[in-house]
């Protein structure tokens, strides 16, 4: 394994040889969005050595970019990190997470860890949260393997909403039209219509080492899906964020608008899901412990993992479905779950078991998440829920063949319900820590409160003429 110094030397050599002019020094924020600063190539060595200061308020913003913690009061802090006065934290480039941008070849991205001024990792930063979950799983004797299926839409941009009055927080939405009509699932002619774009996205993903495997025409108009080769949790979390960023940037250069919003408010638009494939490798044997025996039944590890995912589905929903809009996706008969159940190869169930005797790729697919999720938090949620199931040794309930039928508990029906379940969960506090639990609940309550106090189109139509 290369040392940090060796990796830094390699990055500096590559920057010089490839003629890279600017480096985007970025970290993944609490919403799974890349933020950071751009430096010239000559400043890179110093950035590796000392890190780069950024305002700590970047860790404290909701989805509108509003700072929701009281940074202008004495003694303000989160998890022992001082926040008063909106002072700096440090982002430290990780030389193992260096990516030249093929759509902008004079530039590269370096992903970073987030540190306090003393050089300690900020415990509620998403990289630290996932690293702790991975370490806890390793201590239990397992490594997780995750696979990505990511749905999104690409539209023609009609109005970029650049008027001064539209520069609000959050800004006014852009106006779009469809790129393809869609509603022809996996239709070859629809793929042909979008082939030039999909080839461009695939080539960029491949050049960045994201290992794309398939490109699909999805269910709705202008909707697509990419899948990726399985890998470890940290690698897949970075891939998800980099892919989402790449798609939006490449599409913008083409006069297009890409969105990973869970359920766009557009006529006939489909919802965007993110299906989290997962399996476990035993440290002592190197074998996938989800592969069934000859009788095809669940292994003890698969049984416990499924039981854990189901038992903690409500409490972890805030981590897999983090926005107000996420809960508009939980509708029946739309290939998205709305109840907490599992089934054998059942696309309507929350957890879909894809496990067959002799199949080394046997895995569990959790279909609850959507593409607005922070993948670091979502993966940590899977690990901790699965681990809890392994430890409790409580068997999973019987598999369902009627995933939308009555009887099983419903998934949360609003962001508020998810926040309350998350904040009140002993499992969440034990796994993620009280500081992280309070931190994320505070951020998401601010988002919910803004939503609640916004006068909607429904209210205007219902009451404006009546009273």
Image: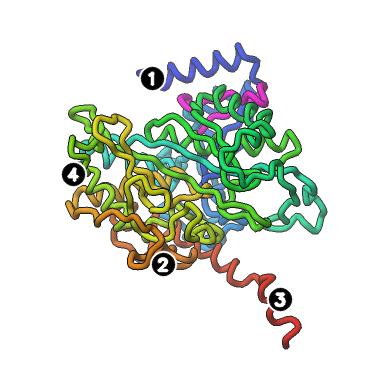
**Which of the pair 9/109 is nearer the observer?**
109
Q: Is residue 127 left or right of residue 294?
A: right
Task: Of the two numbered discs 1 and 4 on the same chain, state the one appearing first in sequence.
Answer: 1
For label 1, the residue is 3
Q: Are marks 3 and 1 in contact (CB under 8 Å)?
A: no
Number of the label disc, if any, that sits on residue 460: 3
Earlier in the chain: of badge 2 and badge 3, it is 2
Q: Counting residues from the N terminus, which is met first, the one under dot 4 or under dot 3?
A: 4
The image quarter containing residue 455 is: bottom right
Name above or below for residue 401 compared with residue 114: below
| Disc with the residue nearer the chain's start (2 vs 4) | 4
Q: Secondary structure at mark 2?
A: helix
Residue 424 x %, y %: 35, 66
* Badge 3 element: helix
**Residue at screen point 44% across, 35% down:** 236
User: On the rendered image, what quadrant is the N terminus found in?
Assistant: top left
Which numbered marker is on residue 420?
A: 2
Mark 1 vs 2: CB contact within 8 A? no
Q: Secondary structure at mark 4?
A: helix
Q: CA distance from mark 1 to mark 2?
A: 44 Å
Please say if the residues under marks 4 and 3 sit with CB atoms less than 8 Å apart.
no
Using the rendered image of the protein, determine whether residue 87 is visible from the camera's viewpoint: no
Tag 4 residue: 300
Magenta span covers which residues? Answer: 95-111
Asked if residue 98 lies in the magenta stretch, the reply is yes
């Amino acid at each position: 394994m290369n040392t940090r110094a060796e990796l830094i030397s390699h990055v500096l050599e590559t920057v010089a040889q490839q003629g890279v002019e600017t480096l985007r020094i970025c970290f993944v924020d609490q919403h799974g969005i890349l933020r950071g600063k751009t430096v010239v190539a000559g400043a890179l060595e110093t950035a590796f050595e000392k890190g780069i200061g950024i305002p700590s308020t970047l860790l404290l913003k909701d989805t509108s970019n509003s700072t929701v913690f009281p940074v202008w009061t004495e003694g303000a802090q989160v998890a022992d990190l001082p926040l008063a006065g909106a002072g700096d934290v440090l982002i430290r480039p990780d030389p193992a997470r260096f990516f030249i941008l093929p759509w902008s070849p004079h530039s590269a991205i370096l992903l970073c860890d987030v540190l306090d001024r003393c050089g300690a990792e900020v415990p509620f930063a998403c990289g630290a949260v996932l690293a702790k979950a991975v370490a806890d799983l390793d201590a239990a004797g397992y490594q997780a393997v995750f696979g990505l299926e990511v749905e999104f839409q690409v539209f023609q941009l009609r109005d970029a909403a650049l008027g001064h009055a539209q520069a609000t927080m959050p800004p006014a939405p852009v106006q779009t039209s469809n790129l393809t009509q869609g509603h022809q699932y996996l239709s070859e002619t629809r793929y042909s219509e979008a082939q030039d774009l999909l080839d461009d996205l695939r080539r960029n993903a491949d050049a960045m080492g994201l290992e794309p495997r398939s490109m699909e025409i999805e269910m709705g108009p202008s909707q697509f899906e990419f899948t990726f080769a399985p890998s470890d949790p940290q690698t897949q979390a970075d891939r998800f964020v980099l892919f989402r960023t790449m798609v939006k940037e490449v599409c913008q250069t083409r006069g297009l608008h890409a969105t990973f919003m869970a359920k766009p408010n557009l006529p006939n638009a489909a919802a965007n899901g993110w299906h989290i494939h997962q399996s476990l490798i035993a440290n002592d044997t190197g074998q996938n412990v989800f592969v069934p025996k000859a009788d095809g039944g669940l292994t003890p590890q698969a049984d416990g993992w499924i039981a854990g995912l189901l038992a903690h589905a409500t409490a972890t929903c805030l981590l897999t479905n983090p926005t107000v809009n996420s809960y508009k996706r939980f509708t029946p008969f739309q290939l998205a779950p709305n109840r907490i159940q599992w089934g054998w190869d059942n696309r309507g169930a929350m957890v879909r078991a894809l496990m067959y005797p002799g199949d080394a790729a046997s895995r569990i697919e959790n279909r609850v998440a959507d593409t607005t999720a922070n993948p670091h938090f979502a993966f940590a949620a899977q690990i901790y829920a699965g681990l809890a199931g392994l430890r409790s040794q409580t068997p999973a309930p019987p598999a369902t063949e009627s995933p939308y039928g009555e009887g099983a508990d419903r998934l949360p029906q609003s962001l508020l319900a998810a926040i309350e379940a998350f904040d009140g969960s002993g499992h969440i506090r034990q796994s993620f820590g009280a500081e992280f639990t309070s931190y994320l609940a505070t951020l998401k309550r601010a988002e919910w409160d803004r939503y609640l106090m916004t006068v909607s189109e429904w209210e205007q139509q219902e009451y404006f003429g009546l009273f």
